[in-house]
Image (cartoon, rainbow, N blue to C red):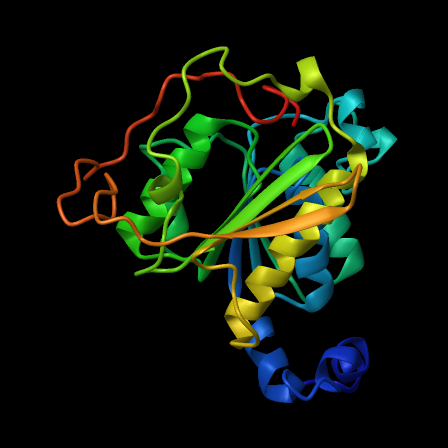
Amino acid sequence: MDFTEEQINRYSRHILLQDVGVEGQEKICNGKVLVVGAGGLGAPVAFYLAAAGIGTIGIIDGDVVDLSNLQRQIIHFTADVNKPKVLSAKEKINQLNPDVKVITYQALLTADNALDIIKDYDFVVDGTDNFPVKFLINDACVLAKKPFSHGGILRFDGQTMTYTPGNACYRCLFHSPPPPNAVPTCSQAGVLGAIAGMLGTIQAAEALKYLTGVGELLTNRLLSFNAKTMEFRTIKTKHSDNCPVCGSHPTVTQLVDYEQATCELKSKNE
């Protein structure tokens, strides 16, 4: 693609990077990323991907902006309360970078629509707030051979990993959703707002690294951190041959909607 003078100036700090350059920025501008959830994680992810110049950003979320969201969901402003999150997010992205095409899905991701929605994207970011949808994203991406970034936050803690075909998926580590009431929600336990930004920017970086081929992705590794101590640790993982979705004898061969259990984040407003 031929960059305009304005685009060269806008993306100059990427172009100056030896590992990115013009070719890498072209890959970013031609990239298509789906962000599932426009809440605590999806907000910084979408903002940074838009700033980077991702060609197409898809955003799916069926919720509206709530006042309690504004403590961490930085893409939404006070005037956006009661507005659909996908529309609020699209408005901010358009203001930040008019080069970016934004496709909105004002709906929940379900077993019926997941494969049809993700098929047109290069990379998927899990910014959701509950285990059933996290497992749905994993299963859909594994079945469709789509790379994705998992993320979860609670209290002062965050964790993330990246899946690419052939490497460990979310189910390789966690075989099935936890039973109801096994894990507190953010509405019960709380969450430090800045944690969402810390983890979301890591997820955005993973998407950009995947598109440009720069660096090492968080594949076969689970990164976790605690903001109270600022301790980060990486746990090595590996593909499980007994995994129910990507193992040698998979039992998960089609998508299902799991019963809503207690979630990692706030059950409604992340």
Which residue extends farthest left?
Answer: 249
Position in image of residue 53 (x %, y %)? 67, 68
- Using the rendered image of the protein, determine whether residue 249 is visible from the camera's viewpoint: yes
Residue shown at the point (54%, 22%) measured from the top left = 263
Q: Classify 119 as above or below 89.
A: below
Position in image of residue 197 (x %, y %)? 75, 45
Q: Left or right of 263: which side holds 66?
A: right
In the rendered image, which quarter contains the C terminus? Answer: top right
* Tally of numbered discs: 0
In the rendered image, which quarter contains the N terminus? Answer: bottom right
Q: Left or right of 263: which side holds 75?
A: right
- Using the rendered image of the protein, determine whether residue 90 is visible from the camera's viewpoint: no
Position in image of residue 189 (x %, y %)? 70, 17
The answer to which image quadrant residue 208 occupies is bottom right
Residue shown at the point (66%, 60%) measured from the top left = 49
Residue shown at the point (72%, 38%) measured from the top left = 88
Which residue extends farthest right?
Answer: 78
The answer to which image quadrant residue 14 occupies is bottom right
Residue shown at the point (80%, 22%) measured from the top left = 67
Position in image of residue 131 (x %, y %)? 46, 28
Which residue extends farthest top?
Answer: 181
Looking at the picture, tell me which residue is in the foreground, 203 or 112: 203
Q: Classify 136 as above or below 5.
A: above
Looking at the picture, tell me which residue is in the foreground, 90 or 50: 50
Q: Classify 93 as above or below 174.
A: below
